[in-house]
């Protein structure tokens, strides 16, 4: 355990699902932690807007291992939290995941990584998929286009080629992502953790060349020899306050994203017979949603402009009519009979993303200052396993490990898989294996 001024061993900036998870993991190791969040409750920011999909289809070995580990936490959620009287708990909802072969190479890489990890996945032909999911149109439509694009018409005839796919039967989603963060907060508090809400960090304090805590906007100083940046869309601002951005090979930015909810195609019981699908061919991902609905999000195809936010607090939360129509029409190419409702329903949020959509779980150039950033969009599922890895990293580095020279290898609690933390280094270049989309 570290020694230093103040009443805490670690200040954690942020109380989303990963911030609360790190508090729990450090607290159960005997650390005195305090989370500081500018919002009024745990999981109130980007976490509350997560699609909360639990899947294993990542483009890096460490990404697959982290997700496979995470699955075992979610399916044993109550036992993991160790709460005597937990109250309502977030629930894991089983739902198969389909990764189609869009021809980009992502499919083949995912299939190999899943096989190497021993994760159940079955390659099915288009005919087999149609028999199981008769509401799917498995013709090849891509690459994705925009409605106004005259050079690549949106309604151009699809390729006659039928798409095969990879089914992962053990996937699913979490029923209430904000509740999951609150569960972790309660579990951390039961271990002695402290949480401060409606508080803004104005400075990352330093003493003798290392982190020494934070100062809040009201002038309150909180001393601790370890500071962890888990500030979501505000992470780049916190890194700038700490003065650690200059050496980083990968940066983070806040990205505006929309997610839509529409009724399932008529006659389709999508809650009972549906699936999740990350579809680079049409440019969307989707899953079933309660009330026999379909939840739809974008996979950031190259034709779409991205809206980067200089100030996440200035986020426009109004759904864009044209983007809503585009997203639903893209999904309708794959989901036969899906209509565009007159009333828009969905949500707008700010994601914290890196240049290659692979998060940064790392130390920094400032001793005692750590980062769990760039995690929005595809890391909710990994919150418990990533929190364990961050706790292991912090302990190892504070105990003298030179992680940059000899990257930490973390053994998964549940699967025993080796997670190479170098994959998530701040010093890396853009990973060529990444899909460079929300799929990771």
Image: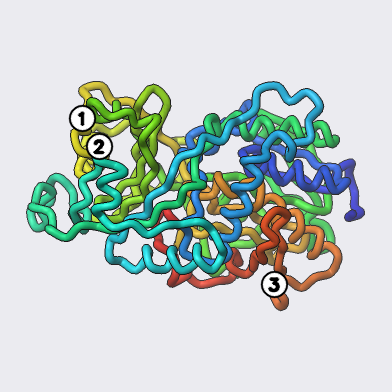
Kindly identify which residue carries mark 3: 407
Whether residue 318 is visible here, answered yes or no, is no
Residue 332 vs 301, above or below: the answer is above
The answer to which of 439 and 402 lies nearer the viewer is 439
| Residue 83, horizontal then vertical, whole percent | 78, 30
| Disc 1 secondary structure class | loop
- The residue positioned 83% from the left and 62% from the top of the image is 398
Q: What separation in Å lies between label 3 and label 2 (alpha carbons)? A: 43 Å
Q: Is residue 152 left or right of residue 308?
A: left
Kindly identify which residue carries mark 1: 340
Identify the mark nearer the N-term, 2 or 1: 2
Q: What separation in Å lies between label 2 and label 1 (alpha carbons)? A: 6 Å
Mark toward the viewer: 3 or 1: 1
| Disc 2 secondary structure class | helix
Identify the mark nearer the N-term, 3 or 2: 2
Image quadrant containing the N terminus: bottom right
- The residue positioned 13% from the left and 49% from the top of the image is 154
Cβ atoms under marks 3 and 2 closer than 8 Å: no
Q: What separation in Å lies between label 3 and label 1 (alpha carbons)? A: 49 Å
Identify the mark nearer the N-term, 3 or 1: 1
Kindly identify which residue carries mark 2: 328
Residue 34 vs 365, above or below: the answer is above
Cβ atoms under marks 2 and 1 closer than 8 Å: yes
Q: Is residue 302 left or right of residue 403?
A: left
Q: How is the image coloured?
A: rainbow
Mark 2 nearby-residue class (10 Å; few <14, some 14–19, many ≥20): many
| Residue 259, horizontal then vertical, whole percent | 37, 36
- The residue positioned 34% from the left and 28% from the top of the image is 293
Quarter assignment of residue 261 = top left
Q: Is residue 306 left or right of residue 52?
A: left
């Amino acid at each position: 355990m570290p020694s230093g001024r103040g009443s805490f061993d670690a200040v954690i900036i942020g109380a989303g699902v990963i911030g609360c998870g790190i508090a729990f993991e450090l607290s159960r190791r005997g650390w005195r932690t305090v989370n500081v969040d500018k919002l009024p409750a745990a999981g109130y920011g980007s976490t509350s807007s997560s699609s909360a999909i639990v899947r294993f289809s990542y483009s890096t070995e460490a990404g697959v291992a982290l997700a496979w580990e995470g699955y075992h936490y979610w399916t044993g959620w109550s036992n993991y939290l160790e709460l005597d009287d937990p109250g309502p708990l977030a629930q894991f909802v089983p739902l198969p995941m389909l990764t189609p072969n869009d021809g980009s190479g992502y499919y083949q890489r995912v299939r190999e990584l899943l096989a190497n990890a021993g994760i159940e996945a079955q390659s099915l032909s288009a005919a087999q998929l149609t028999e199981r999911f008769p509401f799917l149109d498995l013709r090849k439509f891509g690459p994705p286009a925009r409605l106004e694009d005259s050079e690549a018409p949106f309604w151009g005839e699809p390729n006659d080629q039928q798409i095969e796919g990879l089914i992962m039967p053990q996937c699913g989603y979490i029923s209430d992502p904000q509740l999951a963060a609150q569960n972790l907060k309660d579990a951390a508090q039961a271990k002695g953790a402290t949480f401060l809400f409606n508080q803004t960090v104005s400075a990352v304090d330093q003493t003798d060349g290392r982190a020494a805590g934070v100062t809040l906007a009201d002038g309150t100083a909180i001393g601790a020899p370890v500071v962890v940046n888990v500030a979501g869309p505000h992470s780049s601002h916190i890194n700038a306050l700490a003065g650690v951005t200059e050496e980083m090979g990968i940066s983070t930015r806040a990205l505006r994203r929309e997610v839509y909810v529409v009724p399932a195609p008529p006659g389709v019981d999508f809650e009972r017979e549906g699936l999740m699908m990350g579809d680079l061919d049409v440019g969307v991902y989707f899953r079933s949603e309660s009330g026999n609905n379909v939840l739809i999000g974008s996979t950031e195809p190259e034709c779409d402009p991205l809206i980067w936010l200089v100030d996440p607090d200035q986020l426009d939360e109004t759904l864009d009519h044209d983007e809503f129509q585009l997203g639903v029409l893209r999904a309708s190419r794959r989901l036969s009979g899906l209509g565009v409702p007159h009333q828009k329903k969905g949500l707008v949020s700010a994601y914290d993303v890196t240049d290659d959509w692979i998060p940064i779980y790392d130390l920094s150039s400032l001793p005692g200052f750590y980062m769990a950033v760039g995690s929005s969009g595809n890391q909710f599922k990994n919150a418990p396993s990533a929190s364990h890895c961050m706790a292991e990293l912090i302990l190892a580095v504070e105990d003298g490990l030179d992680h940059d020279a000899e990257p930490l290898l973390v053994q998964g609690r549940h699967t025993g898989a080796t997670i190479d933390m170098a994959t998530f280094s701040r010093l890396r270049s853009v990973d060529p294996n990444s899909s460079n989309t929300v799929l990771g």
